[in-house]
Amino acid sequence: MPIFPEAAASRKLERDLDRRRLGGVCSGLARYTGFSVTAVRFIFLGSIFFSFSLTFWLYLVLWIVLPGRRSSVSELSWRLRRKARRLEKLIETTQARLRQPAARSALEHTHQLVLNLLPDFDGLSNRSSNELAAAKRAVLEQLPTMLEHYLRLSPSDPEPAGGSAAEERLGQELQRLETQLRGTAETLYYQRIEKAGANSAAHQTPTQQAVLLPVRQQLESLQRRVAGRVDDEVERKITGIVDTLMTLLSRLPQTADATDPDHYNLQQIAGDYLPGAIERYLALPPMLARTEPVSQGKTAHALLAEQLDLLDRSLHSMLTSLYRHDAQGLSIHGRFLRDKFVEHTDDWSQ
């Protein structure tokens, strides 16, 4: 997922206050397990006939124990929130009908991008000519029309009207939409980096500058050492990761001390995860790093690119969380990265 939607690895058991009918327990369980909200509510209601007392007390305990969760959708204006709810239902219904992995994946990725962009749509006129307005029209007009057209097809219809051909067409349309939305999200992302970096530089104290200087010097040294050992795309990815890291590190000390978990997560990325991935790659002979499979049939260069993509996506989400003052989002992505890198850092270097 949330540019990157909430990953399944970071999903927590919480009451979903956005789709609640009472306390949000059933909607929270549905979100955590992946089942539809309707199915979970039906199970709870059905269990009343067998054990009313147990069901009542179980629901009450979960209501008390589980923390509540509101997504960014709940903070939207009333008009946009209503459209977002309708779109959410269409996506959920479509996802339940799709069978082809490619179409399901395209819908999931598009959904995550939509969730990330919705807060930026608020107060924006559809008649505006900029890229964000075009994305808003695509999300609130084209996407619902696309999904409704697919859902009108009866599952029992023969191909090509209602079979795999329809799913293939929907998947292709979703992939085109995903590309458009990802481009818009990336534009906003780099605008935030530039804005946050400018603000941070203007407000940094001499102490903060002294603390960050060794980090920047170490990362710039890594960039110089890896130059020429990887292709241009990987070099650009490393540069983007370094810029995002420095932006996040320069912003956090204004609201958190050095012992804060969010600050610690970023320090680990800057001082361990990113340098560790690059150092392991540089330790390999240059020719073998690009040509010799080292793990799961992949070269070290391909595995480095995958790890950089993981860092880039997570840092991207962390910056968006910081931009929206979502401390929980920062911690979630920090823990996600820690789990990934601590458990799998040596898989391809042995």
Image: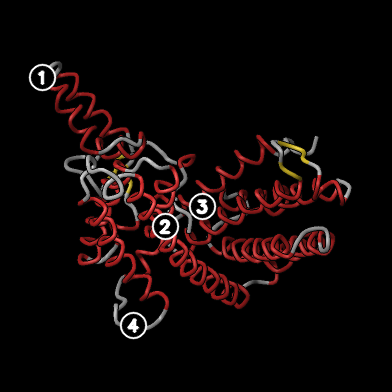
Marks 3 and 2, how far apart at CA: 33 Å
Front label number (1 vs 3): 1
Of tags 2 and 4, which is closer to the observer? 2
- Where disc 2 sits, the SS reads helix
User: What is the secondary structure assignment of the residue under circle 1?
Assistant: loop
Distance of label 4 from label 3 (alpha carbons): 32 Å
What amino acid type should be assigned to the residue bearing mark 1?
Phe
Q: Earlier in the sequence, mark 1 or mark 4?
A: 1
Residue that label 4 marks = 128
Q: Residues within 10 Å of mark 1 (few under 14, many from 20)?
A: few
As drawn, the label of residue 330 is: 3
Alpha carbons under labels 1 and 4: distance apart = 55 Å
The figure's colour scheme reads secondary structure
- Residue 240, compared with residue 292, is above or below; it is below
Residue type pointed to by label 2: Gln
Q: Which numbered tag is attached to residue 49?
A: 1
Q: Residue at x 73, y 51 (%)?
A: 271
User: Going by the image, does 79 lie left or right of 65?
Assistant: left
Most distant residue in the right direction: 285
- Residue 290 percent across, percent down from the top left: 80, 50
Question: Does 11 sit left or right of 334 as displayed?
Answer: left
CA gap, disc 2 to disc 1? 46 Å
Q: Quadrant of residue 76?
A: bottom left
Q: CB under 8 Å between callouts 3 and 2?
A: no
Type of the residue with mark 4: Ser
Spatial distance from mark 1 to mark 3, Cα to Cα? 43 Å
Front residue (pair 142, 72): 142
Question: Which residue is under mark 2?
Answer: 172
Q: Secondary structure at mark 3?
A: helix
Q: Position of residue 132 (x, y in %)?
A: 40, 74
